[in-house]
Image: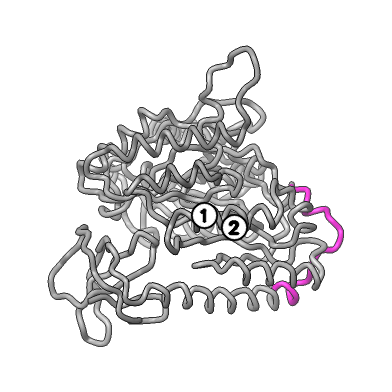
Amino acid sequence: MKRVALHNLGCKVNAYELDVMRQMLQEEGYKIVPFDEPADIYIVNTCTVTNIADRKSRQMLHKARKQNREAVVVAVGCYVQTGKDACEDESIDLAIGNHQKNELIPILETFLQNRENGCGHTEAERVSILDPERPVPYEEMTLRVSPEHTRAFLKIQDGCNQFCSYCIIPYVRGRVRSRRPEAVCQEAMALADTGCREIVLTGIHLSSYGMDLVEKRSGERPGETAYKEECLLRLIEKLHEIKGIERIRLGSLEPRIVTERFAERLSGLAKVCPHFHLSLQSGCDATLKRMHRQYLAGEYYEKVCILRSVYTDPAITTDVIVGFPGETEEEFGQTEAFLDRVGFYEMHVFKYSRRQGTIAAGMPGQISDVVKARRSEALLELDRRQSRMYRERLMGREKAVLFEEPAVFDGRQYMLGHTMEYVKAALPSEENLSNRILNRKITGFLQENIVLLQ
C-alpha cells in the first residue's frame, strides 16, 4: 500500500478538487498520510494567482522532495500552467495541469509503471496541460463524502472570460465551462445522503455559470447578464428541491448578476443563505477602469442596495486590492470612503502583487511595499470596526445555527457553528450537537469574531 501525502494551496475550487483527488486515491487503495510525514508520493495542488502563491507552491514542492528523496513528487494545477518552470524544477517528477485532474489515477499509475520499467525522464514528465486558447469540456469530478460532513463545497463551473488586468487566472484555467445541472444535482443528492446539510456553490467565475451550455441557434441571444442570471437561478432552484440539503450558500459573485429580479427570486428560496460575496477590488472608478473591471462604484452600490431591499441585514462581504499600479492617495481615499459608505460584514484586503504575464505588471506607477502596507492596515482596521458593528446589530435576535464541532474556552464546553449569514456562534453545551440546526438567541460576544448564544 503506497503512502500518499497531499497539500492544497489557493482557492475553494482547488480545495474541492484536492478533496476529490484524495477520495479517488483512497478508493484505489492508497494510504493517505499527513504532508509532514514520510510518503511514497507527494501531491501538491498548486496556486499561481500571485507571485507569492508561486513561491509557496515551489516551497511545498521542495519540502516534499527533502522529506523523501526517493518519493514521486507531483505538481498539479495552476502553477504548472504558467510555463516550463515547473518542468525544469528538479523537485518535480510529474506535472499535471488544469484539465485532467479527474484522470489522476491512470496518469499516476502509468508514470509509476514506466519508472519501474526503467522508462523514467530526466525532467518532469508534463502531461495533460490545458491549452487556455482551446475550448474544452467541463472536467467532471464528483465528491461523494465531504471532509467537513456538515458542509461541502460543490464545484459547478471552471474558467473565466473576464481578463482583468491584474489576473493570470484566465490564462491558466481557460475559458468558461459549466457543469451539467443534472450532474450538480446528483452530487448534491449524494452528499445529502451522507448527512451533509449545507452546500457551497463554487467556481472560478460563478456568475458565468451556464454561458457555454446554451445551444447555438439563429437570431440574437438574450442579453449576457440576463442569460447568466437565469442559468444560475434555475440551478439554485433545482438544488433547493433536494431533500436533506437545508442550506445553499453562494460563492463569489460579480456585481452585475444582481438585479431586482435575481434578488427577489433568491429571497423566495428559504434555503439560500443571505450571505453574498460581491467582488469589488476598488471603490475608485479610475482604478476600476485600469483593472478592466466591468462596473463602476455607483453600480456596485446599487447592487448592494438591491440585496438589502429584499433581505434584512444580509451579510455582504467583498475583496479589495490596495496599491494597484497608479493608485494615488486621492484614489485610495475614494476607496476607503466608499467602503465606509457600503458597510460590509467582512472585507478581504489584499496588497497588489505584481504578476508577470498580466497587463498590470507592465503598468507605470507601481506602488512601494511600504505604501501598500500602510493602506492595507487602514482598511483592515475599517474591516474590524464594520465587522463588529454588523455582529452587534444581531444582538437579541434568534438565528438558525448549523452546529459543527465542540470546543473549549476558559475551561467551559461549547458547540461552535454558523448562522445563515456565516457568523460564527458558540452555545454553552456539553451535548454534541454536530450537524444539527437549532434556533438560538444571540446575546453577546464570546470572542471578537464569535457571538454567544443562549
| Residue 386, disc | none
Tag 1, which secondary structure?
loop
Image x and y of residue 181, in percent:
40, 30
**Is the N terminus in the top left, top right, bottom left or bottom right quadrant?**
top left
Decide if residue 213 is on the left or right side of residue 423. right
Q: Quadrant of residue 123?
A: top right
Going from the N terminus, do you reach mark 1 or mark 2 first?
A: 1
Q: Nearer the viewer, residue 116 or 414?
A: 414
Q: Quadrant of residue 341?
A: bottom right
Image x and y of residue 442, in percent:
30, 75
Amino acid type, residue under disc 2 in the picture: Ala
Decide if residue 338 is on the left or right side of residue 76. right
Would residue 342 be counted in the magenta stretch? no
Instruction: Give yes or no for contact between labels 1 and 2 (Cβ–Cβ under 8 Å).
Output: yes
Write down the residue under mark 2.
53
From which residue to which does the magenta span run? 358-372
Few, some or many residues within 10 Å of mark 2 (<14, 14–19, 20+): some
Few, some or many residues within 10 Å of mark 1 (<14, 14–19, 20+): some
Write down the residue under mark 1.
10
Amino acid type, residue under disc 1 in the picture: Gly
Q: Residue most toward the front?
A: 309
Marks 1/2: CA–CA distance:
8 Å
Image x and y of residue 198, in percent:
31, 50
Which residue is drawn at the image coordinates 63% and 74% (left, top)?
Answer: 379
* Relative height, residue 276 to residue 223 (above, below): below
